Each structure stands twice: as structure tokens, then as C-alpha cells.
Image (spheres, grey):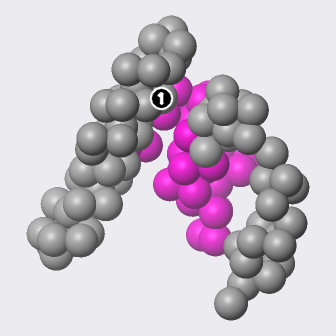
């Protein structure tokens, strides 16, 4: 969480309060998973995260299906919002082994 607070302190994203709240909620869900707090607690934290991601509220139900759920959409929106604010371009790192580059180890 220290990195979260540092990033927030040095950013100019106060107008995107939903973004910060969703990052914090996603971290809490991750901690629940890491500490094996149970499926019920994990699902509650994931639902909370999804509810905080503003763009997901306008998502068409046609876009949600078994292999790409609201959780996937919410994580994608958070990633895109952060990448835009950081001027991050994933193609700048073509040799990194990721799902995006198709070079998974």
C-alpha cells in the first residue's frame, strides 16, 4: 500500500477518485486471496471493486460473458486509465514475456 499512497501523492488524478478507490479495493481483494480468507470474503471484495469502477456502470450486458466477465472489464478499465495517465505504451517493451506480446514463458 505504500506505493499506492506515494503514487497518489505525486499524481494529478484527484478528479478520478473512482480510480483510486478501485485500486485500493482491488488490493484488498488481492490481500484476501493471498491470506486465504475464503471464497465468500473474496467474492464480496471483488464485487466492491467492480462497483467502484465508473466505466463498468455503463457497460452493455452484451459485452459480458463467461470468458470475459465484469471483473475482466473492470481490471481492463483500471489498467487503461492508469496507462493513459502515465503515458505508458506496452509496445515500448516488445521483448517482455507477457500475454500482450504473446511471448509467455
Neighbor class of circle 1 (other Cα within 10 Å; few <14, some 14-19, many 20+) is: many
Q: Is residue 36 left or right of residue 84?
A: left
For the point 60% across and 69% down, the residue is 66
Query: Can see residue 95?
Result: yes
Q: Is residue 8 left or right of residue 44?
A: right
Which region shows up in magenta? 49-78
Q: Please say whether residue 66 is one of the residues in the magenta stretch.
A: yes
* 20, above or below 80, in the image: above
Residue 32 in which image quadrant: bottom left
Q: Which of these two is toward me, 48 or 97?
A: 97
Q: Which of these two is toward me, 74 or 23?
A: 23
What x and y, as percent, mark residue 3? 36, 41
For the point 85% across and 53% down, the residue is 92
Q: Is residue 103 left or right of residue 18?
A: right
Placement of the C terminus among the 4 image quadrants: bottom right
Q: Which of these two is toward me, 46 or 105?
A: 105
Q: Which of these two is toward me, 80 or 8?
A: 8
* 60, above or below 33, in the image: above
Residue to which mark 1 is pinned = 19
Residue 103 in which image quadrant: bottom right
| Secondary structure mainly formed by the magenta segment | helix
For the point 87% across and 55% down, the residue is 91
Placement of the N terminus among the 4 image quadrants: top left
Residue 61 in which image quadrant: top right
Q: Please say whether residue 76 is one of the residues in the magenta stretch.
A: yes
What x and y, as percent, mark residue 9? 38, 20
Residue at the extreme bottom of the image, as rendered = 105
Q: How many marks?
A: 1
Amino acid at each position: 500500500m505504500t506505493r499506492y499512497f506515494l503514487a497518489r501523492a505525486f499524481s494529478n488524478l484527484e478528479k478520478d477518485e473512482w480510480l483510486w478507490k478501485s485500486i485500493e479495493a482491488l488490493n484488498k481483494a488481492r490481500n484476501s486471496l493471498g491470506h486465504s480468507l475464503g471464497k465468500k470474503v473474496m467474492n464480496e471484495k471483488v464485487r466492491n471493486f467492480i462497483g467502484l469502477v465508473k466505466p463498468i456502470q455503463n457497460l452493455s450486458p452484451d459485452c459480458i460473458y463467461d470468458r470475459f466477465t465484469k471483473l475482466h472489464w473492470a481490471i481492463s478499465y483500471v489498467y487503461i486509465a492508469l496507462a493513459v495517465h502515465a503515458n505508458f505504451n506496452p509496445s515500448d517493451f516488445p521483448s517482455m514475456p507477457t500475454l500482450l506480446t504473446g511471448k509467455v514463458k
